[in-house]
Amino acid sequence: MHATRSRIAAFARSPFGSALLGGLVVGVLGWIAIGAGWVASDDDSGSTVATAPLAAAASDSDGGGPTVNEIYRKDGPGVVLVESTRAPQSSPLEPFGQPGGGGGTATGSGFVIDEDGHIVTNAHVVDGAESVEVTLGEDGESFDADVVGTDPSTDIAVLDVDAPGDQLHPLSLGDSADVQVGDPVVAIGNPFGLDRTVTAGIVSALQREIRSPNGFTIRDAIQTDAPINPGNSGGPLLDAAGRVIGVNSQIEASGGNGNVGIGFAVPIDTTREVAQQLIEDGEVQHAFLGVSGTDVTPEIADVLNLDNDEGALVQSVVPDSPADKAGIEAGDAQATIGGQQLNAGGDVIVEADGKAVTDMSDVIAAVDSKHPGDKLELTVVRGGDQRTVSVTLGDRPAEATRPG
């Protein structure tokens, strides 16, 4: 009997913005975190279905494209079942601070990306795995898989299987930058271990920010209402032409493990770049700034008497981080605005490399476009004084440091 418990993390932007603790963002305010990943089994009487966040993507349908059935028949053979086994752990904490320590089996999805046997899935599906097995093709043959590399910051992992060529059915990758709200999408995966289940919906929103397993933010996530559930994690989100535009990663859940029509996918443009680096180098490097911040709104600017009614208000600075070394400062005064507590009196970032910063997402994008060791010019305002500082970005740490 399967004991199923999902720790599903959804990270929605609040009107007060988000926090940058590395290249990507971690929410300071208004985020829901129930992490995703492993489910421990108390004994060896059975396995557990472990999942996490889930999502979907979009299409450029012109009304004359293939049907869902046709997409399923074409792409279904390229979707795989991923089963990860973990030995009992000595640590008293599971990912995201949940009590645990037992072993178990994580069940998720993945998809073939080339004829060399490389498979993309979510990092949280194989996190801590002692062994990984994938089931390929319509015949359901299973193969041992090697973990080529994982990137917790984007929740992407690449596996490698030594399987016959006729068992490998690579999926075509689309362009998530072309996705539009309202585009039809199809999700294929293994919800609750039910192999190669297909569901359909639309893209319900774009440019969402979701929280990664190591606490940073994955930006430009695709929101969908296509039904996805625990076990869809790592599976493809397909557009109306059957091209992958996202990797199902998270769901918003008000209670329990079920889908409530709000899912999120890591965009394929991000996935493609990360997968390539993992295949070539076995790891991915991300630039690190080391601040948390919140969006400046006219209301915040008015209450805090700021000179700018847009920008990114620094809320905290990680000690000895690149931002700290460059002299960027957070305020130490407390203010409550709209029920949210803010640190007032710190720097407001108004430009990054000469481009106007309207909110934290602009700072995130600027850092994401860089590599460790690159310089980032930030223009900041505090107390009516404006200055420009040059920050040498560092390597992102293994986990985000939460403001506090």
Image (tube, rainbow, N blue to C red):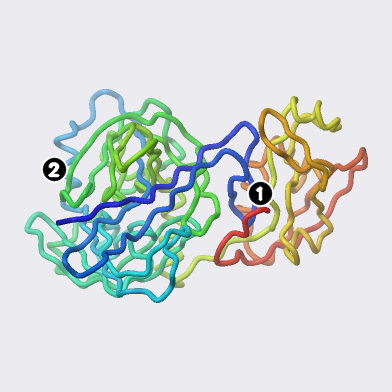
Is 191 situated above or below 149? above
Is 210 situated above or below 298? below
Determine which residue is flagged by label 2.
Answer: 73
Count of picture labels: 2
**Residue 331 percent across, percent down from the top left:** 82, 47
Q: Residue furthest left?
A: 139
Cβ atoms at labels 2 and 1 below 8 Å apart? no
Q: Residues within 10 Å of mark 1 (few under 14, many from 20)?
A: many
Tag 2's secondary structure? helix
User: Residue flagged by tag 1: what amino acid is it?
Assistant: Ala
Relative horizontal placement of residue 2, taking residue 307 as reference (left or right): left
**Residue 13 percent across, percent down from the top left:** 56, 36
User: Residue flagged by tag 2: what amino acid is it?
Assistant: Arg
Rounded to the nearest whole Å, what is the CA distance between mark 2 and mark 1? Answer: 41 Å
Relative horizontal placement of residue 304, taking residue 216 as reference (left or right): right
**Residue 246 percent across, percent down from the top left:** 37, 45
Residue drawn at (75%, 30%) of the image: 300
Residue drawn at (67%, 35%) of the image: 340
Q: Quadrant of residue 267?
A: top left
Q: Quadrant of residue 337?
A: top right
Q: Earlier in the sequence, mark 2 or mark 1?
A: 2
Give whichever of 184, 241 is nearer the camera. Answer: 184
Q: Which mark is residue 101?
A: none
Residue drawn at (30%, 34%) of the image: 226
**Residue 378 percent across, percent down from the top left:** 78, 49
Relative horizontal placement of residue 345, taking residue 276 as reference (left or right): right
Tag 1's secondary structure? helix
Q: Quadrant of the N terminus?
A: bottom left
Give whichever of 193, 311 is nearer the camera. Answer: 193
Q: Quadrant of residue 288?
A: bottom right
Determine which residue is flagged by label 1.
Answer: 366
